[in-house]
Amino acid sequence: MTTMTDNINQIKLTPKDYSSGLEVKWCPGCGDYAILAQIQKAFADLQLDKSNTVWVSGIGCSSRFPYYMGTYGFHTLHGRATAIATGVKVQNPKLNVWVATGDGDLMSIGGNHFIHALRKNIGIKIVLFNNEIYGLTKGQYSPTSEYGKKTKSTPYGSVDYPFNPAQISIGAGATFFARTADRDLKHLGEMIKRAAAHSGTAMIEVLQNCVIFNDGAFEDYTEKDRKDDNVLYLEHNKPMIFGKNKDKGIKLNGFTPEIININEGNNSINDCWVHDEFDTNPTRAMILANFANIDGFPLPFGVFRDFTKPSLEENIHNQIAEVTKQKGAGTLEKLLYSGNTWKID
């Protein structure tokens, strides 16, 4: 006998089904639209259960995201999204918990929550909308803005050195880190799917264009006439090559990366560094992260690392089950009268 529930479960969801239907209120041309569309498309491809999916955000343009998703959502406080998401995931590990956040929200006031989420390896997915500017508050420099950036808050140029989200993530122990861009639609969708499949904390940095306050910041990595020479697409077990003619390669000389022409001299594709995204040693992933700080080097896109270890929620619930097995189920009264307590007559 076929029930109504069976029929509902057989319906294939479309990207539109993952939309809340609310009017999207971002500036025309904002890169956030592309991120929203690709996430909805990726969710439809994966057929994620809407009733088990939660989006958590902090404050900023990107943090309007939960309003536009046809899932559960929680718009929280500035910088606190990863802390709230941690509580949601630990309380109910079966939920798909995603965080939408910006560089000001995550890398500044939310930095402490962020690094500890990575350290604990909570099974949440963090999507960083990195436009290297404070957009919602009208154009101040952010923790990821480049040195010398002239903004309303730094009219003579910023004298701060920027954070590198890849270096912070890998240094804090991220088990998954990937980078992509809002205008690289197919690649963006692939990275969302890869993050969804990861069991621990998955961190995706999305280079996102702010058309009002930082327009064109990432054109070297998104425009057809120059991206081939400036982007290195990482593929597991493939040599690192790039360039319009695919004639440039990355050679690893000890711990020092070098750019070589694979068609000149004694160089060949066999000299190129072969990417291993499943390497549990963070050293090579950190070398890749540092490419952003070396003049003339391409910016790596793709999965830097992806390895598995037990998540925080898994460890917590396994511990609870083991202690309960040993001591039996507890009660609130037992808890209140345990430990260093005393009774006054």
Image (spheres, rainbow, N blue to C red):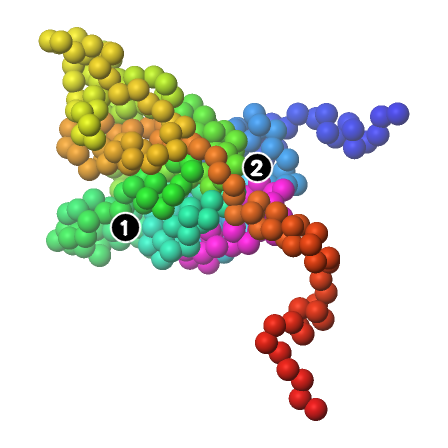
Instruction: Pick whichever, 157 or 338, lies toward us.
Output: 338
Q: Which residues are magenta?
A: 77-99
- Label 2 sits on a secondary structure element that is loop
**Residue farthest to the bottom, as pictured:** 345
**Type of the residue with mark 2:** Ser
The answer to whether 246 appears left or right of 148 in the picture is right
Magenta run includes residue 87: yes
Instruction: Pick whichever, 40 or 320, lies toward us.
Output: 320
Instruction: Pick whichever, 275 or 104, lies toward us.
Output: 275
What residue do we see at 23% from left, 27% from top? 298
Return the disc, 1 or 2, that comes first in the chain's sequence. Answer: 2
Please state the horizontal and vertical placement of residue 273, each as a whole percent of the image: 26, 21
Magenta run includes residue 154: no
The answer to whether 337 appears left or right of 176 in the picture is right
| Quadrant the C terminus occupies | bottom right
The reply to whether discs 1 and 2 touch (Cβ–Cβ < 8 Å) is: no
Up the image or down, 260 lies above or below 150; here it is above
Q: Residues within 10 Å of mark 1 (few under 14, many from 20)?
A: many
Determine the image quadrant of residue 299: top left
**Residue farthest to the right, as pictured:** 1
Whether residue 234 appears in this view of the structure is yes
Whether residue 25 appears in this view of the structure is no
- Label 1 sits on a secondary structure element that is loop
Q: Which residue is mark 2?
A: 19
Up the image or down, 293 lies above or below 7; here it is below
Residue 143's tag is 1
